[in-house]
Amino acid sequence: FAVLMTLPFVLARPVLAGSLTIAAAADLKFAMAEVVEHFRAERPGDKVEVIYGSSGKFFTQIANDAPFDLYFSADIAYPRQLEEKGLTASETRPYALGRIVLWSLEPELAKTPLRDLPRAPMRKLAIANPDHAPYGVRAKEALQHQGVWEALEPRLVLGENIAHTAQFVDSGAADAGVVALALVLSPTMAGKGAWTLIPAQWHEPLEQGYVILARARDNPLAHRFADYMGSEPARAVMRRYGFVLPGEAGP
């Protein structure tokens, strides 16, 4: 009798809310916010915190026990290195290829071929810092491919990450910038100035990947979110922000 009396209360007990902290590359600032919103729609009690920044700096922090559950990197090499060090609870999964663009609030400047930038009326060009930001590495490669890196180096301003780089252009601190396509397609940036897609063959692929970190080994919310990134709703959001998804052709 006692079992029958308590059973309804057990069944009625709510599912405990989960908690998750994600370290994410700055190019995901807007896309990830939408993905999280869709993910939490079914379980609004779950807490999902996303911190955006430089993939390289996150790598260093995570290697030194920073308290993150999931790591989304603009360079898949970083999570793979953590995996090799035994600091992860899953294999590294690719989630997208990023694309870079030349963006300026001055449409004519945005249409200038990279090889002509040294002769353009431009005081400052913004790129992410290539020492730790994957988008900065790819920007440098594209400028080197066009033979203008050395000529433009004195005019560069370096962002801590790709979102910071875009802010330089948006604020007028730089006349133009090599930034992420995902950012110029965002609601905040869309319609401002103009941008030109930089050919993917001018730089190494911006292959991006994510991994569940060791501290989240027994965190079911981390595993659910990792799986959700492969779902069609999440992929649809990523597509809208210009990311090239695994198994799909790019623009």
Image: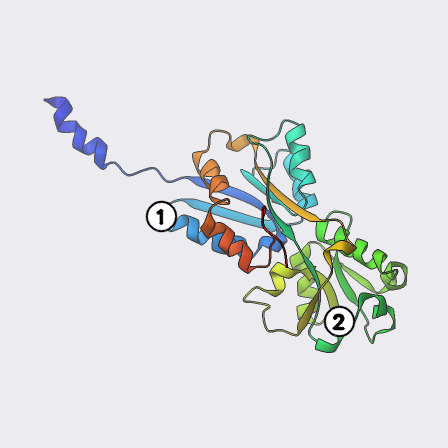
Q: Is 248 on the left or on the right of 54, as rendered?
A: left
Q: Secondary structure at mark 2?
A: loop
> What residue sits 18% from the left and 29% below the top?
7
The residue closer to the viewer here, 148 or 3, is: 148
The answer, for residue 33, to whether it is visible in the render is no
Of residue 132 and residue 83, the one placed in the foreground of this image is: 83
Residue 133 rendering spot, x and y as whole percentages: 72, 50
In whole angstroms, how far apart are the C-alphas of marks 1 and 2? 43 Å
Disc 2 residue crowd, few under 14, some 14–19, many 20+, Cα 10 Å = many
Q: Position of residue 205 (x, y in %)?
A: 71, 49
Residue at left 75%, top 59%?
127
Q: Amino acid at mark 1?
A: Glu
Type of amino acid under label 2: Asp
**Above-or-below relation of 28 to 68:** below
Of the image marks 1 and 2, the number of the one nearer the N terminus: 1
Quick check: 14 above or below 166? above
Name the quadrant containing residue 8: top left
For disc 1, the marked residue is 42
Q: Residue sitting at 76 percent across and 54 percent down? A: 201
Say which quarter of the image contains residue 117: bottom right
Q: Is residue 141 left or right of residue 206?
A: right
Q: Is residue 210 above or below residue 122?
A: above
Q: Position of residue 224 (x, y in %)?
A: 45, 39
- Name the residue tied to disc 2: 175
Q: Nearer the viewer, mark 1 or mark 2?
A: 1
Q: Residues within 10 Å of mark 1 (few under 14, many from 20)?
A: few
Q: Quadrant of the N terminus?
A: top left
For the C terminus, the quadrant is bottom right
In the displayed structure, 135 sits above or below 222; it is below
Residue at horizontal 64%, vertical 61%?
Answer: 181
Residue 216, percent from left and from top: 51, 33
